[in-house]
Amino acid sequence: MSQSTTSGTKAVKAAVLLIFALLLFAPFLFQDVRALEVAARVCVFIVLVASYDLLIGYTGIVSFAHTMFFGFGAYGAAISLKQMGPGWDAVVVGALAGMGVSLIVAVAIGLLSLRVKAIFFAMITLATASVALVLASQLSDFTGGEDGITYRAPALFKTATKLMLDENGKVLRIFGVKVNGKLAAYYFVFFSCLALFVVMLRMVGSPLGTVLKAIRENEARAEAIGYRVVSYRTFVFCIAALVASLAGTIYAIWLKYTGPDTALSFAIMIDILLMVVIGGMGTMWGAVIGATMLVLAQYYLRDLMGAAAKATVDIPILPHVLDPDRWLFWLGIIFILLVYFFPKGIAGTVMAKGAPR
């Protein structure tokens, strides 16, 4: 590894550590409800994108069913909390149910489909995810249909509990921030997602990660030297499904609402693909950078364009070009530029810059 490659890796890791530090202190640095929503979404999508990168980046598996497993976890928690009430027993039951369904479906897809060529496997996963979305919309007695399910989270995440009150009965404050259920829910999301990310990071750094890369680079050669390729591909597909399911459960507890649009929408799958490409395939660090950048762009690009349009109101044409309603157009332009200047994603390109050929 060259010195420039080492410095590039250090720069990427420093950026990731900075992102996690900002997420850790987000409730104190950005004291508004919207910022906390954005930070929680970033945490969940870091896990979701990293788990998908296990498939597409490390093993070379193209799947369009990742949101389906995310939805299983979310609906598992939602149905359980709705039926059993807002207790931790309901959370555990819902998480286990979501993971159980995800594992069964992942094993079935893996064993039946991973022997086929990549494009056919991708189409099978797309069809399976479409069936899950239709079932969620049609089985309204269980899933709430198009309206989804609303429910209460465990008592710890209520607006204020006795543990969060001082001797005068007032809500405790730390650096001016109320210690309430919203804060507790955010740190539940943050530390749960951090733990899942660290597990995946250790996984790709283990000998398993080396085998997955070997399968990605040359499947026939990996099988020739003795690795059971289908078994490894099925295993990593199941691991990714379980992690996505847990991410869905975490997000469901945070939102206190689960519906087709928030858990099973194909738009979420598109977001995951964009995040992987922006951050860089085959690197866990890229998942952090890609998820953070796209979520921030989705929430704040429109506001920035509105401010820019007001600042250039006296310049011909420019205010119309920067109209906030055109934010998707500019998001597309930004994505094209990122792909052009960072062909391996931001993390992948920076880490590979100057590497010996």
Image: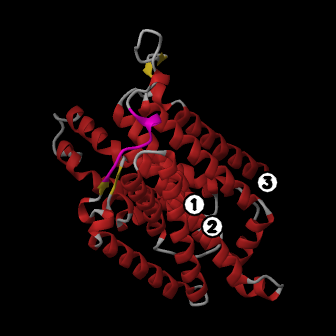
Work out whether residue 232 or residue 19 is closer to the camera in this orientation and state it: 232
User: Which residue is denoted by mark 1 in the rendering?
Assistant: 243
Q: Quadrant of residue 226?
A: bottom right
Position of 98 relative to 223 (above/below):
above
The dot on residue 239 is: 2
Image quarter in which the N terminus is found: bottom right
- Which mark is in front, 3 or 2? 2
| Residue 134 visible in rendering | yes
Q: Is residue 47 left or right of residue 210?
A: left
Instruction: Tell me the colour scheme of the image.
Output: secondary structure
Q: Are marks 1 and 2 in contact (CB under 8 Å)?
A: yes
Q: Secondary structure at mark 3?
A: loop
Type of the residue with mark 1: Val
Say whether residue 130 is left or right of residue 46.
left
Callout 3 touching callout 2 (CB < 8 Å) = no
Residue sticking out furthest to the top: 168
Q: Where's residue 4, x and y in %?
A: 73, 49
Q: Amino acid at mark 3?
A: Ser
Furthest-front residue in this view: 84
Q: Which residues are magenta?
A: 150-158
